[in-house]
Amino acid sequence: MESENVKRDPNRRRLSIANIVLMGFLAIAGFFLILEHRAHLLGWLPFLIILLCPLMHIFMHRSHGGHGGVAEAPEGERPRRPHH
């Protein structure tokens, strides 16, 4: 019986090492990109916060069905609309 490690494909190990090297390179490149362009990124920050408001409104209203929903009323009663 051969060991399970002997049967493994050597190319699979190379791919994982290549992925680790690629991730390290991308992390270093991202760090220097942010470091060198911090002034540009901070200049856009107020606009991104303002853009975040409508995006949060759109995505957070999915959980309760949107505006103007009518609450369930017990049988025999007329459903009431919420007062705004």
Image: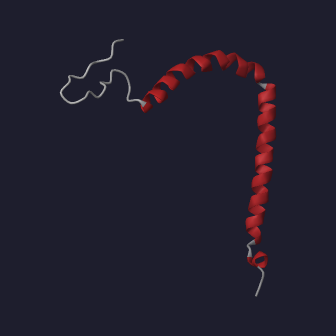
Q: Position of residue 59 (x, y in %)?
A: 48, 29
Q: Quadrant of residue 65?
A: top left
The outermost residue toward the bottom is 1
Q: Position of residue 79 (x, y in %)?
A: 24, 23
Q: Position of residue 20 (x, y in %)?
A: 78, 53
Left or right: 80 with respect to 27? left
Residue at point 66%, 18% (across, down): 44
Residue at point 33%, 12% (across, down): 83
For the rendered model, the colour scheme is secondary structure
Looking at the rendering, in which quadrant would you find the N terminus? bottom right
| Camera-side residue of 62 and 41 | 62
| Camera-side residue of 17 and 6 | 6
| Numbered label tally | 0
Q: Quadrant of residue 14?
A: bottom right
Left or right: 62 with respect to 36? left
- Relative to 73, is 12 above or below? below
Residue at point 74%, 74% (across, down): 8
| Camera-side residue of 73 and 70 | 73
Left or right: 39 with respect to 48? right
Looking at the rendering, in which quadrant would you find the C terminus? top left
The outermost residue toward the top is 84
Residue at point 72%, 19% (across, down): 42
Q: Position of residue 32 (x, y in %)?
A: 81, 32
- Relative to 74, is 11 above or below? below
